[in-house]
Image (cartoon, grey):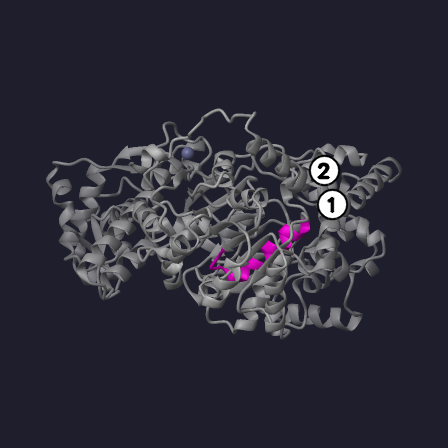
Amino acid sequence: MPISALSQPHNAQPNTTDPLLAAAQDMLLRVFGYSEFRGRQAEIITTVAGGQHALVLMPTGGGKSICYQIPSLLRPGLGIVVSPLIALMKDQVDALLEVGIRAGFLNSSLPSATQRQIEKDIQEGEIDLLYVAPERLLQPAFLNLIAQVPLSLFAIDEAHCVSQWGHDFRPEYQQLGVLASRFPQIPRIALTATADERTRLDMIRVLHLEHASVFISSFDRPNIRYTIVEKDNGKKQLLDFIQAQPEGSAGVVYCLSRKRVEETAEFLQSKGLSALAYHAGLPQAERIRVQDEFLYEEGRIICATVAFGMGIDKPNVRFVAHLDLPKSLEGYYQETGRAGRDGLASEVWMAYGLGDIVNVRRMLAQSDSPPDIKRVETAKLNALLAYCETATCRRQMLLGYFGESMPEPCGYCDTCQSPPATWDATIAAQKALSAAIRTGNRFGAGHLIDVLRGELTDKIQQFNHHALPTFGIGQDLSEAAWRNVLRQLVALGYLLPDLDGFGALIVSEQARALLKGSETLHLRALSETKPKNTRSKSYSSDLPSDAQARFDQLRVLRLAFAQAQKVPPYIIFNDATLRDMAVMNPAHLSEMRHISGIGEQKLQRYGQAFLDRLNELRAQTIDAPVVSATIVSTIALDQAEQATKVDTLQATLELVHAGMDRVAIAEARGLAIETIGSHLLKLYQAQHITLTELLYITPDEIQEIQTTAQDLGLKPRQTASKVLKETLQHRYGYADLNAALWLWH
Ligand SMILES: [Zn+2]
């Protein structure tokens, strides 16, 4: 039977009298604390719980794990989950233990005594769900061990690892076919977030899923907003983008090279953001430390090469930014897909310009790949560039690339929200191409623009280019407008970079029809005003300010529990649950029970503590005077920012009044010390805290900073520069430097 026929729902309306479905729904509410299944979860669960095989294709964040966890618990015996991501197993098992499921994992990272204990637990039926690495599962002794106990199912996670076509190929995965011959009666469910047709056929063949039901979900990630901007000053644009996010948002910034990763992290740190650097060149211990900090602390921004991400399952990554072009649309979808796994609104953003396209086009041309591979790579790059330059809905284009059609524009990407103007650029393109031809296909964008605009530069005179008929024929467009035209001509393949890397642009064969006038060309117009980063749908700033204050306080409490148990905060409660709690503001445990994500065990463990915190906050808002609006008026903030900023300053102020120092506040709030430092300075400027509460350096140290600043030509009350920090051998953080500069008269 064709796959498309199989993928149709068996039964569009779930049959509520189905006892399996009723049991699954009961378990969903009681154990996991959710009242409804999402998407096709219910169908998948009843299929597998009923003893059938299944192949599940679902995007990241679609709720895959519940599709095997619930059937495994509904069926008698041990459920075995095969996963290649050893780094993730502990988190997955911790999350299950939190909701009261007897789960464990086995991989090479465990001491052998622990491994033996788990094997004993398996024999004695003490474990219901076991996560295991494929190489471990395939050991004959282990297969013999599990053959002696009742088994509920096999779940093969990241099943695309069976395919050599994918970039995650794992040879051990190809041997998992043994499960079908050795345990033919046990249901197998294979799951992946990869949609590619060829990979799908490989999964069916290797895992013997010919008779399995296939469930394909839409790969749309409706909570993600896609934005791409023209790069002029990439780092500054990145900073503006990050500063438009709610304070304390965790995010990933992807850069092409190790050097760019380090520079970007340093730049963001200098602006008071808690940024981390991650790339393959760091010692392993440092990589682990950075990864753990990103997972276990809140609000970290990680600057990374694409080496970072596989094995990261942090659900509340609020944004993903690309400061350099990804390799392909597949890569882009995967990297941006790390945002918003919790289903809450998330932003993905990219800045790219002419230089980036010239670079990637040249790298591809210079690669040693065989011609047929190169053809595939060129096609992939062209698809990516067309996506960057599109004037139509990005989501439609992205999903279309993966073979999924979306009938209407999404209304929630940058091109939908502020549609770019397009214009007939045929003549402009002909002028630009002609300038390249007349100058011998030997010059870069800057010189071509000078020729077009008739700028009498030294270089123009040196090459006698002012004598060309094309000289000055493009005075109707600004330099920026020409740059915009040239970028699109390179993106669309009419101009190609030279292979020597001198930046020359060469007219391609493809341009012939355009030059002859037998083809017309429409391009995106230069955006006149910088698109404003509206945050109308943002998850945090759309909370009413009192709920936002509760949310901030509940986060502090959650972090305390997480640190005590050495688990990431989202294992205690995810952001969506915490947000509901802040909005509903329950006063009794019975109300707490109705909040999504709170099952029986979590209610028992944490319900009272979170309830007490909410009751305290209620009491405080009645007694304590609210920080006056003068904080806001003394600091120039635009109106939209005021609500969230005043809350975050107030949260810091309350902790100062509770007698906490800067380090303790930073820890409790999950923010960087530099960020708290900037809060303290603002609070001091608005006269809400004393000088003693502001300062963490001695009068001598203040003197030293001020003298050095004077030597460097800085002015009183200026913001600290990187040079100042370096000159003082990094002995002071920006918070201290800025405080000293503020006090300098
Ligand atoms: Zn759209």
Q: Callout 1: few (<14), some (14-19), or many (20+) C-alpha neighbours within 10 Å?
A: many
Q: Which residues are magenta?
A: 82-98
Could you say which quadrant of the image residue 307 lies in? bottom left
Residue found 16% across the figure and 51% down from its top? 508
Q: Is residue 467 magenta?
A: no
In this rendering, the answer to whether 415 lies above or below 349 is: above
Q: Position of residue 588 (x, y in %)?
A: 81, 34
**Disc 2 vs disc 1: Cβ atoms closer than 8 Å?**
yes
Q: Which mark is residue 554?
A: 1
Q: Callout 2: few (<14), some (14-19), or many (20+) C-alpha neighbours within 10 Å?
A: many
Q: Which mark is residue 582?
A: 2
Front-most of residues 692 and 706 = 692
Quarter holding the N terminus?
Answer: top left
Observer able to see residue 478: yes
Quarter holding the C terminus?
Answer: bottom right
Q: Residue furthest front?
A: 148
Q: Is residue 429 left or right of residue 210?
A: left
Residue found 67% across the figure and 55% down from its top? 671
Front-most of residues 452 and 464 = 452
Label 2, label 1: how far apart the Cα atoms are: 8 Å
In this rendering, the answer to whether 132 lies above or below 189 is: below
Amino acid of disc 1? Leu
Q: Position of residue 600 (x, y in %)?
A: 72, 41
Observer able to see residue 687: no
Q: Which image quarter has ligand 1?
A: top left
Amino acid of disc 2? Ala
